Amino acid sequence: MRRVLVLLLLAACGRYPPLRIVDPSGVQVDAGTLPKPSQCTVAFGGPSCCGADGRRAGTAACVDGEYACAAGTAVCECAGQAQEFYCADFCGSDAYVEPTCGSGGWICPVGLLATSTCPANTCWGEPGDLCLSPACVDGHWTCAGDDGGVNDPET
């Protein structure tokens, strides 16, 4: 503790390089606990939330790696199973419908597949028109060769 205080005083007097602000955004450990893997894997954002009456009331948001619904609602359940997928005509589709509750649990209409049966890194929907060379990387559309703005020209 004493050494830290001396270093701080010396830095304030100009004998050491000035203190700089450290960006903690890349730090992944909080209070010595490693973050748990995200359990938010439902394509198209998240499962539906239902009220006590069973009616759909919005979509769950991913909070700290788990789905959370607004107060008074919870992730929709059917035959004791939480909704963990939507239904699409193919993996990567930009169109989907919600599954329906059958006697054995969630089911997709005939001809559609459960999004949970697709590979984990599937990119859903279209990449958009902002890229000349879109690429699917870890389940997200990116622009091939995009460095995140590091080498963008000055404006």
Image (cartoon, rainbow, N blue to C red):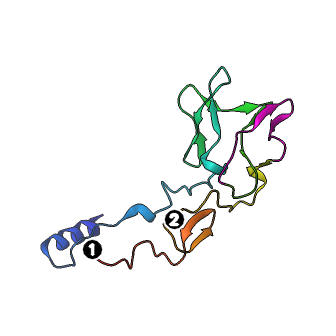
Looking at the picture, which amino acid does disc 2 mark?
Answer: Asp
Position of the C terminus, as image quadrant, is bottom left
- Which residue appears at 53% of the width and 32% of the height? 70
Q: Residues within 10 Å of mark 2 (few under 14, many from 20)?
A: few
Instruction: Please tell me in which quadrant of the rendered image residue 110 appears.
Output: top right
141 on left or right of 113? left
Q: Position of residue 116 (x, y in %)?
A: 75, 51
Circle number at residue 155: 1
57 on left or right of 120? left
Q: Which residue is mark 2?
A: 129
Of pointers 1 and 2, the one earlier in the residue sequence:
2
- Which residue appears at 60% of the width and 45% of the height? 66
Which element type, helix, strand or loop, lies under badge 1? loop
Looking at the picture, which amino acid does disc 1 mark?
Answer: Thr
114 is higher (above) or lower (below) than 91: above
Query: How far apart in space, not on screen, are marks 1 and 2 (Cα)?
Result: 22 Å
Is residue 40 visible in the rendered structure shown here?
no
Q: Is residue 109 magenta?
A: yes
- Which residue appears at 72% of the width and 32% of the height? 77
Position of the N terminus, as image quadrant, is bottom left
**Range of the magenta residues?**
94-111
